[in-house]
Image: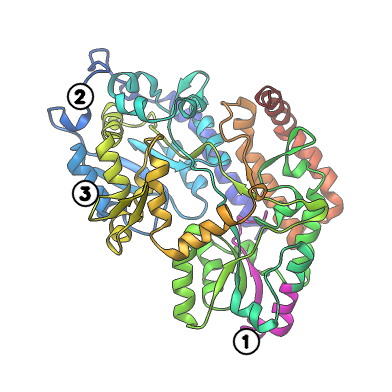
Amino acid sequence: MLKRHNKVMLLTLAASLSVTSLVACSSKSNTPASNNAAPASAAPAATTSGPKPELKSLQIWQKDDYNTYPVAKFLEEKTGYKVQYDMLPQDKAADKLNILIASGEPYDAVTTGGTTDFKALFADYAKKGALTDLGPLIDKFGPNIKASVDPAVLEAAKVDGKLYAIPTKTISFAGESLYVRQDWLDKVGMKAPTTLDELVAVLKAFKEKDPGGNGDKNIPLTIKSEAMFINNIVGAFGMPLFWNDVNGKLTPRIMDPAFKEYVTFASDLFKQGLLDKEFAANKDATAKEKFTSGRAGMIMIHWADVPVVNDALVKNNPNAKANYIPALKGKDGKIGLSAATGFDRITFIPKASKHAEDAIKWMNAKLEPATFKEMAIGQEGKHYTFKDGAYTPIQPIFTDERNQANNFLMGTDDKNYPTYWQARVRKDMRLFDAWNFMNTIQPENTRVKDPLGLAPYLPEFSKNFQQLNTMVGDYTTKLIFGAEPISGIEAFQAKFKSSGGDASYKEVNDWYATAKK
């Protein structure tokens, strides 16, 4: 297990480092638009004449094939561009992306998640010269991009004063939390836990009373391997985010005074057999299968996964029921579910692209107001109804033809999309109930927004984030697994600081001091 982690780390580092040498050899033919390009007032790409090249786009993972999804056909008709879509893997997406960028795969657009780790990775690519400067292209071919995307969000996507990505703005909400078998709770005569002590009591009851009848295969709590910081639980230790405010300073989890308490707690869960003994090897799908097959009583999942998880669960056990537990309280009343801010996803154009101009024309055409709305939620009367200011999906066609539409976004109509978006959480009442519980019913103070979400490009932070996050993640997993002694935390903290942690801390807090004013 540990050897596998080390191999992945070395592969990731090698791929990332080779980006620099790749860019040094890049052809000048991959640079931005020529000087005789059309002015900013030019018509959107959908109405320009002349043959259009087929574009190649790398997207985030989804369960459906992008190329056959109805939105792809709609966009081809409206923009005039045929696009070949590829996907990043569901697990270890950053590792695969590093390899593709380093190898010079000629994608015309790459869309990743917009979380802190991917934001830092994107900035690192830009700094190493692996990406196309989009500013001149957007000036010439992107009037809809300029009119639609929040200027503050575009500003936050700049690296050294240049715009290297079109960000899709986050609609801020809490996403992941702990999801529990309600019928198991009923069988053991307990309510959903609200504190860490109550959580332990519930997991012990699941182990000792085995309400699922699994015998030695029974798993009280399962998580995926990347979830060593278990959302909801880690919030009860005051660390819901990668970096949290500790006495007015943004502090990475490994340097947080609560880190030792958290890993001691999680390690105790593991030692007692309350946390899946195979968690370090679990892929996302593996953890979900353990829950839906009836082997696990609790799992950490995103509310967007609730309908699919429930369908699989009920198929295996028609009497099964599941719900989210409340945000757990720790000592001193600490509580928190992470709520993203800033970028939902990021779209950039690698230097290896052969069609950078056309890629921007295509993205601009997608943001023509009527095209964008129909891409996002379909046609009124066919895919949705609109009444009293609210969009309500018409089923099953909305789910069939627009369920994955959000994965085609490359920037949004930021004034109107938050209203259009409400149709998405109403497409399935189980989905709405899950989202509503975390984001409306739960008190406002349970949702902790990431202060780094709209931070500008921070060179030291961006350069070090992925490596440091991998270091901390692997080390935390080893601590929980019992492969490293908790007594060694201080020595690891010193290693973290000398590996870029100190430089990142200073840079982040120099910015944070001004951002709080």
Quarter-of-image position of residue 77: top left
Question: Looking at the image, what colour scheme do you see?
Answer: rainbow
Residue at the image point whose x is 75% and y is 44% from the top: 254
Marks 3 and 1, the one that precedes in the sequence: 3
Residue 226 located within the stretch drawn in magenta: yes
Residue 354 located left or right of residue 474: left
Residue 371 located left or right of residue 433: left
Residue carrying label 3: 73
Marks 2 and 3, the one that precedes in the sequence: 2
Q: Is residue 51 above or below residue 35?
A: below
Residue carrying label 2: 43
- In front: label 2 or label 3: 2
Q: Is residue 359 above or below residue 89?
A: above
Residue 51 located within the stretch drawn in magenta: no
Residue 90 located left or right of residue 511: left
* Residue that sits furthest to the front in the current view: 388
- In front: label 2 or label 1: 2
Q: Amino acid at mark 1?
A: Gly
Whole-percent x, y for residue 94 in the image: 51, 45
Q: Amino acid at mark 2?
A: Ala
Whole-percent x, y for residue 199 in the image: 73, 67
**Quadrant (top left/top right/bottom left/bottom right) for the N terminus:** bottom right
**Quadrant (top left/top right/bottom left/bottom right) for the C terminus:** top right
Q: Amino acid at mark 3?
A: Lys
CB under 8 Å between callouts 3 and 1? Answer: no
Q: Is residue 247 above or below residue 478?
A: above
Real-space Cα distance between discs 3 and 1? Answer: 48 Å
Real-space Cα distance between discs 2 and 1? Answer: 65 Å
Residue carrying label 1: 213
Whole-percent x, y for residue 391 in the image: 35, 51
